Image (cartoon, rainbow, N blue to C red):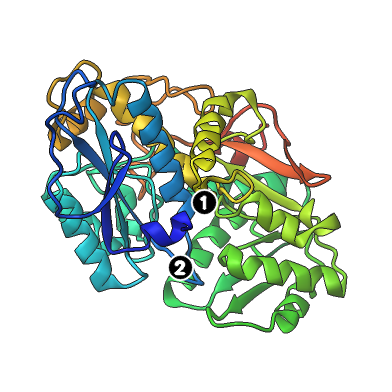
Amino acid sequence: MRSRRRVAVAAVVLALSAVALVMAGTAISSSGKYSKFKYPTLIKVGTVVTLNNPVSQQPAVAAALIAAARAYNREGGFNGHPLGVVICNDKLDPNEAVACARKLADEKVIALVGGQSLVDTNIQPILQAAGIPMIGNNPIGAALYSAPNEYFPQVPAIIQYQAMIGYAVHNKSTPIGVPFSDSTSGRGFLGLLDGVAKGINNGTGFDPTVPVSTTASDFAPIAAALNRGNPQSMLSLVGIRQGVPLIKALEAQGTSLQHYMFTGAYALSDVQQVGGKGGDKFFSALSYPPYSSTAMKQFVKDLVAEEKRGNSDANLNTIDPRAVDAWISLRAIAKVTRGQKDITAASVTKGLDNAKLLDLGPMVPKWTPSTPGPTGFARVSNQSVWFTGFKNGKQVLFVNHPVTLANALAGKF
């Protein structure tokens, strides 16, 4: 059975040490089966994702989290504890999102790690009230960027978008055309980023801007509208499920565009689907370097091992960078709880609040979670991106080191 089908239930607990999948609420005995661990009490982390939905699909996030947890358990546990994973599918439904948050609280997870919910404003207050930290998730609601229980070892999309604008402006890849989600939040996001562009481009913002319905299926007229004015870069404010057919339509019509700029919601398979010159125009500011980089060696190793177990969602060709967020968040928890006999949500929170210059590996700069972010984004403590693109269908670095947002906006690469 495909792993996507296995996790597409309201909530599951994966007792990874026993390699058993059980419905949430089923008792898990700690006698005997966890005897190889220093501390035999099962601890759990959780994530909230959307599965089997045309707007948002994140089976790779679940696969990466499971892969990381299995890797810890193979080595004697998470700081000596057997580690379980709670995966909850919000089904893109606000009520289901609330149910997921309550499920994580009921399961007494020590943290939410990674994942993305388009209705996350329904989740965060419940977890905050339960004292559960949220680590490495990808916020949609603006309030989450300043929520006291949020911690971002990765670079959230809002920073990635701004860094790409800086790269395009300072490398003369303008005008910047923007397809955006035709909604109140979509227009608000467009306005925010247009202000960033104007601030570093002598008052010149995006041109053209084209609204895209979430139900759009004919992308030829949208492509034609984007091509007016001969933009040099496209900053995509629509999901990859719409972005791929839009690029195909642009390439079919012929276009002046040199870069298709996306945040990390796409995988190599999406680039390959476009193919040819169009695929090599993908450009991103990401939290991590390419999977081919030696910095990503351990992540790749864990995912390969998970795919060999039969989890097809762990295939590196279909893993988008958001999946790394869950993986690296577990690393952060392991660092701040090292040596603890009793690991709880409260001890994880205290550890993160007190941590200084955490070394999570060469894929991200040393991280101090309490570092304040910019106005309106107080919890965005990591602001260094890797500029990546594609050549001959393979991901490459455009700049061979991470670049801070401030430097990107100033043209310092």
Residue 195 x, y percent position in the rendering = 54, 59
Describe residue 127's horizontal placement relative to residue 87 as left or right: left
Residue 324 x, y percent position in the rendering = 48, 40
Residue 131 x, y percent position in the rendering = 13, 44
Q: Residues within 10 Å of mark 1 (few under 14, many from 20)?
A: many
Seen in the picture, residue 251 relative to 219 is either above or below; the reply is: above
> How many labels, in total?
2
Describe residue 135's horizontal placement relative to residue 27 as left or right: right
Residue occupying the point 16% across, 22% down: 39
Quarter-of-image position of residue 360: top left
Describe residue 131's horizontal placement relative to residue 405 as left or right: left
Residue placed under numbered mark 1 in the picture:
313
Residue placed under numbered mark 2 in the picture:
52
Residue 175 in view in this figure? no
Seen in the picture, residue 118 relative to 394 is either above or below; the reply is: below
Amino acid carrying mark 2 in the image: Asn
Question: Which circle marks residue 204 in the picture?
Answer: none
Which one is in front, 9 or 287?
Answer: 9
Q: Measure the C-alpha gap from mark 1 to mark 2.
A: 12 Å
Residue occupying the point 36% across, 35% down: 69
Residue 285 x, y percent position in the rendering = 61, 44
Seen in the picture, residue 97 relative to 385 is either above or below; the reply is: below
Q: Residue furthest front?
A: 32
Mark 1 or mark 2: name the one nearer the start of the chain. Answer: 2
Element under label 2? loop
Amino acid carrying mark 1 in the image: Asp
Which one is in front, 38 or 408?
Answer: 38
Q: From the image, which quarter does the C terminus lie in?
A: top right
